[in-house]
Image (spheres, helix red, strand yellow):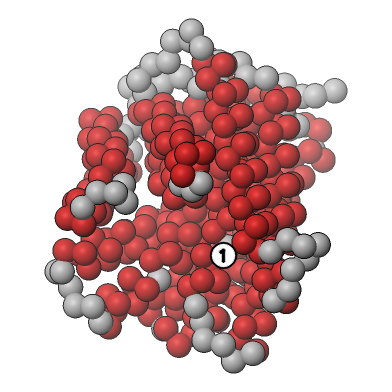
Amino acid sequence: MEQRTLSMNGVGMGYLVLAVIAALLGGGSSALQSAGLVPASGFWMALEQNHASLMLLFVVIPAFIGGFGTLWLPTALGRAGMVLPRLNAVALGCLAVAGGLMVGAPAHQYAALLLWCAGTLLAAMTLLATLFDSRADGATRVTFSPFIWGEMLASAVLLLTVPVLGALATHQQSAGLPFSTALVEFFAKPVTLVTLLVGFGIVFETVSGTVRFPMRWVVGLMTGAATICTVLWVKAAFAQGSGSDIAGLSPLAVESWVLGATTLASVLLALVWMVGTWRTYLSARVPVLWGLGFLLVVSTGWVSQFTQGGGLHSALQFGMLYAVFCGVYFWRGELCGRWYSTKLATVQFGMMCVATVLALPSLAASTQVVSSTLFTLSGLCFLLTMGLSFFKDEPMPQKQGGARARLQNNAGMVRS
């Protein structure tokens, strides 16, 4: 059992390392290209052209589904590790090889995308198998938290949408069409939905020790958003693939419906969070700071969505980073009880906030270069913080919030 747990920790960390490398390559290449420090050809041009693919496919999914699903989910379920551990390791291998092909072999972009689809499906099925197995085992059956619900619904979304993406890629390849990043950008809506589900699940989880939320509302909103947006996107995908309208709706119109449903779900989930935390003392812990940053960035997206007809998609992509860092710090410090430098984590948060503000499209191009540079420095600061944490491997002097103890108590409460 000890070997299995250590192995799963290694696989989970592998997912997070893959996400961090993809984020540094995608964000760092943009910063260097904007500053004119690297030539616009060769390897650097490949990184720039695959910026959207790196951020959407190799940051969100490996971090939220693979990383947190492997490292965090078993503890939340009161289990020693994931079921089907070898299948989970194969999924990580598929994603890593797909990322290498995407960047290093431009002639094999379709193969990289199909391999990514295979790895993502394996990771989602492993996560769902672990969840279903926990419900079948009466000795470890626990009440699902918002994080568990978010992981389960996000995996279900991927299980239904990734095969459609693979089918579209296969259709275009068989038709002899050159690979286009528009195909990956079209898949941005399901990725946005995954960010919404897992991101809000993490934000709710960070304060669940001191705040009680109406779970029916949280679960209902998450389930409704996952169902409606998945159905609409699949409908739009089939319409785009066939080149015809379905039931009088163009793909563009259906995509706007998906974004509208995502906007509404985000607003309502944030309202539930704010009502639950109203007049509640929230300590300025590092995970709470990142969680508040996620809510603030997404709120800015709502304002832009309602006033200008767009903005939530890009806001959720920025919010994705806040949710990832919130989850990593919460897992390392409060679930594992291991030390990390809160000062470095706070400095990283400050750089990320400034970079987010400077990333506004209305600002000058030079400001965009500064924003990209700060994003890259923020990622390097995160690597330094986690590197020191794992190098020292010391216990946290005071466990903030007692998250691990709370989860263990939850695991001991068997539902009749």
Q: Is residue 52 left or right of residue 161?
A: left
- Rendering coords of residue 265 (x, y %): 62, 36
Mark 1: few/some/many CA within 10 Å (<14, 14-19, 20+) = some
Furthest toward the bottom, the residue is 176
Residue drawn at (68%, 42%) of the image: 225
> Which image quadrant is residue 141 in?
top right
Q: Is residue 414 visible?
A: yes
- Rendering coords of residue 138 (x, y %): 81, 33
Furthest toward the top, the residue is 279
Q: Is residue 79 visible?
A: no
Q: Which type of secondary structure does the marked residue at label 1 adopt?
A: helix
Residue drawn at (57%, 36%) of the image: 266
Viewer-side residue, 320 vs 312? 312
Q: Is residue 16 left or right of residue 223?
A: left
> Which image quadrant is residue 163 in?
bottom right
Q: Amino acid at mark 1?
A: Phe
Q: On the image, numbered disc 1 is attached to which residue?
A: 186
- Rendering coords of residue 155 (x, y %): 66, 51
Q: Quadrant of the C terminus?
A: top right
Residue drawn at (51%, 31%) of the image: 203
Viewer-side residue, 392 vs 167? 167
Up/down of 356 relative to 84, above or below: above
